[in-house]
Every structure is written in structure tokens, then in C-alpha cells.
Image (cartoon, rainbow, N blue to C red):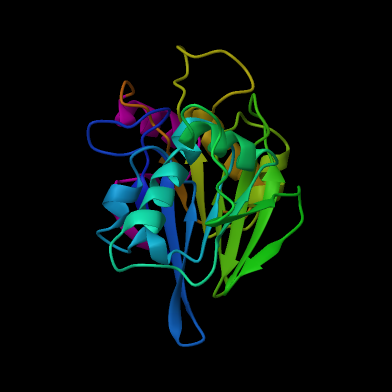
Amino acid sequence: MRFTVIGCSGSMPGPASPASCYLVQAEHEGRTWSIALDLGNGSTGPMRSFLDPIDLDAVVLSHLHPDHCLDVCSLYVAINYTPGRSRESRMPVYAPPGAHERLGRAYGVEQPENLDGRYEFVDLVARRPFTVGPFTITPVPVFHPVEAYGLRVEADGAVLAYTGDTDICPELSELCADADLVLADCAYVDGRDDSEGVHMSGSKCARAALDAGGVKRLMLTHIPAWNDPEVCRAQAAAIWPGDVEIARPLATYDL
């Protein structure tokens, strides 16, 4: 299993990165399977350097804030209007309940658009695993102002734990235990951001990974353009015993 950081800018696209989107791939049954974890604004363009987004096997949305889901609308345009391209089946979109209506409102102008002709929306259910090709994906509820899930992705004997957007919470131990890599929301900075139930700081990311136990690698992501990534790294490194990695746009990582 490998994943490519398509977008890792927090809350909105940044000068060097779209908003949240991670392309996860693995070989299975003689071909490469590809899923997108989130499809934040601006992400479908850079994805083309690795894969035509029309060829995704599924999209999985951690929650329905624009910086994690809005390019589902752009993908809809690509599926409908790319000359000479088509899909034999609808694109599965696994998402919190209400995604069909939420994204239909985002795409429509005078009234919501019905996207069912191109998408098959499937509601995420807490702790109910589902499979896409070689991937087993388990949504774990996390601590955010809207219904939100961390996504535990397993394939080829490896585990990627993606927190989505969350503050530190007990469920992160369930999500991250024994993960080969934890991809952690680090939008906040200790000493500056003190609201609860929204995002983590570097120190909270490190504490969550340590509390989970067995985590091999910690990577900080969802860092907004107004944050200094090295400050976030330093706050995590004060607690995490190993190297603290920073997600880099268009970088690919093997698990």
C-alpha cells in the first residue's frame, strides 16, 4: 500500500497545496486499485499527475466541510464532460449521512443538483468496516463540530490511520493502535489556539499516537497556510520519541 499527498493544506487551499486529499493505492487482482481519502477544494487538478480522477475506484469523505469534500463537484464535471471518457458504473462515494444533499446544493445554482446519475452515495456507519478491492476501511467517530470520522485503512498487511479533522479524544486510540503511519490533523498551535472540539496541535497529535500504542510513524498534515510547519513539528517532537514527519504535497509514501 502507498499513498500520495494530493493536498494537505488546512481549512483552505494554500500557496503550494490544495486542501485535503490523499490518494491511496495497492495492487490487487492484476491491477492498481485507487481510492481518495477526502476530495478537498482544488485537489482534482493535481491528482491528474498521478491518476485521472475519473478512474478512482471510490471516494471516502471524512466529513462534509468544504476543504474535505468540495471537489466532488469538480469530479462530477470531469465525469460528465471529459471528451472521449466515460465510466461503466457510478462512482462510490462513502461519506457521512447527508452528503448527497450537501454536495447537490454545492453543485446546483438555482436549486440543488441530483448527482445520483454519476455517484453512488453510501453512508458511513461508525465502526462498520467496508471493502474496496484490497482495502478494508473502518470509520471511527472523532471530535469535530460536525459528524466526522477518522479512517483506518488496511491493505497488504499495513495500516494507515487518517484522523480527518478532530481534537484529541479517546476514539483516536481505537483508530490509531498499531498503525504503520498516523496521518494527523495539526491545524492548531499550542499557546495560540485554545478552543476545544475542532483540531489538534502538534503536541496533541503526538500524545494521541503515543496513547494509541504501537504506532510506527507520525505525520502531521492539515497545516493551514498561516502556520509555520516547523513550529508544529517542534511541538510534536517534544513528546513523540521518533522523527516527526510533515506531509508534503505531491509526495508518495510506501507503507
Q: Quadrant of residue 167?
A: top right
Q: Is residue 182 above or below residue 52?
A: above
> Looking at the image, which residue is at 66% across and 49% down?
175
| Residue 124 location (% of width, % of height) | 70, 49
Give the residues in magenta: 228-255
Q: Quadrant of residue 19?
A: top left
| Residue 96 location (% of width, % of height) | 67, 42
118 sits left or right of 152 in the view: left
140 sits left or right of 23 in the view: right
Quarter placement of the C terminus: bottom left
Instruction: Examine the structure image and report whether residue 27 is included in the region drawn in magenta.
Output: no
Q: Is residue 185 something one can see in this rendering?
A: no
Of the pair 127 and 123, the residue shown nearer to us: 123
**Residue positioned most to the bottom:** 30
| Residue 188 location (% of width, % of height) | 47, 23
The total of numbered circles placed on residues is 0
Of the pair 172 and 118, the residue shown nearer to us: 118
> Looking at the image, which residue is at 51% across and 86% down?
29
